Amino acid sequence: MSSEPEEEPVSVLQRFEKRLEGLVEGAFAKVFKGVVHPVEILNAMQREAEAHKAILAGGRTLVPNRYVIDLSPYDHSRLAPYAAALAQELAQSQAEFIGEQAWTVYGDVIVEIERGDGLDTGMFRVTAEVYTGGDVAPVHQSSPYDQPGGPQPGYPPYDQGGGYGPPPGHGGGGRNIRLVSGDGRTYPLQMGSTVIGRGDQANLRLPDVGISRRHARLDFDGAQVVLTDLGSTNGTMVNGQRVSAVALNPGDMIQLGTTTLTFRVDG
């Protein structure tokens, strides 16, 4: 009986390659002949995380959680049909790598794949940054869920309680949490998860060609609503800023495609 210890970068890369094999029924293997390979991108993302470490109070190590991958025009056009799936796999593997190093991130790891017009075929560029989610829009003035103490390893800083104003222990059942569209339509939010998109799998379907089939998800735990982009093609904006995951404030404006929804809380 021998238990082999996992080697940090290698095991993450091996799992990533394994998932790629099963993704899109092997289409990836054909697409990547002669173009940049995702494992090279993941390697570069790991190096960027290593290069941008910052030591926080208490000795924790903060690393970037948002990675923008610029691909050459040729590579980008070849990979376009798989970009969202690839971004999701890269983000998951990077999150695993960061977790194994016991590093800290703000919010979720997000990967965006974009076209880099100055790049030759086979070349790519990785830009890494610390993206603080709810703090990107004008910093929320003493909003109730900006928790002291900073981020925790692998979890967003808003996963630690807080809420939209009722006293502790009163739950969220009495309040009217909803989204209101620009034309006045109202979409009440229930406890649990609500997927927004234009496909059959979405709970909240919006007839907007700029919206992905599964575009974003709202998670309401009775205290707060967290909006998460699901690797959508055109991204999700809150108050004019692109977001990966953010806890919503009453009055926040969410933009998906050409649709604008205002987050409302009453009661």
Image (cartoon, rainbow, N blue to C red):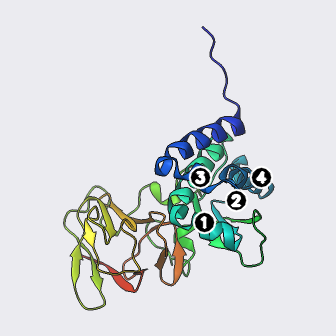
Find residue 207 and report its image quarter: bottom left
Q: Distance between the residues labelled 3 and 1?
A: 10 Å
Q: Mark 4 points at which residue?
A: 47
At mark 3, the secondary structure is helix
Residue 22 to residue 164: above or below: above
Marked residue nearer the N-terminal end (4 or 3): 3
Marked residue nearer the N-terminal end (2 or 4): 2
Task: Say which quadrant the N terminus sits in.
Answer: top right
Marked residue nearer the N-terminal end (1 or 2): 2
For residue 77, side relative to residue 213 (left or right): right
Q: How far apart are marks 4 and 1 (CA)?
A: 25 Å
Marked residue nearer the N-terminal end (2 or 3): 3
At mark 2, the secondary structure is loop
Badge number at residue 35: 2
Q: Name the residue under label 3.
A: 30
Disc 2 residue type (three-letter): Val
For residue 118, side relative to residue 170 (left or right): right
Disc 4 residue type (three-letter): Arg
Q: How crowded is mark 1: few (under 14 residues within 10 Å), some or many (20 or more)?
A: some
> Could you say where residue 219 lies in the image, as x and y percent from the top left?
35, 60
Contact between labelled residues 2 and 1, with CB atoms less than 8 Å apart = yes
Q: How far apart are marks 2 and 3 (CA)?
A: 10 Å
> Could you say where residue 48 lies in the image, as x and y percent from the top left?
76, 57
Q: How crowded is mark 2: few (under 14 residues within 10 Å), some or many (20 or more)?
A: some
Residue 262 to residue 66: above or below: below
Front tag of 4 and 1 = 1
Q: How far apart are marks 1 and 2 (CA)?
A: 8 Å
Front tag of 4 and 3 = 3
Badge number at residue 78: 1
For residue 58, side relative to residue 95 (left or right): right
Contact between labelled residues 3 and 2, with CB atoms less than 8 Å apart = no
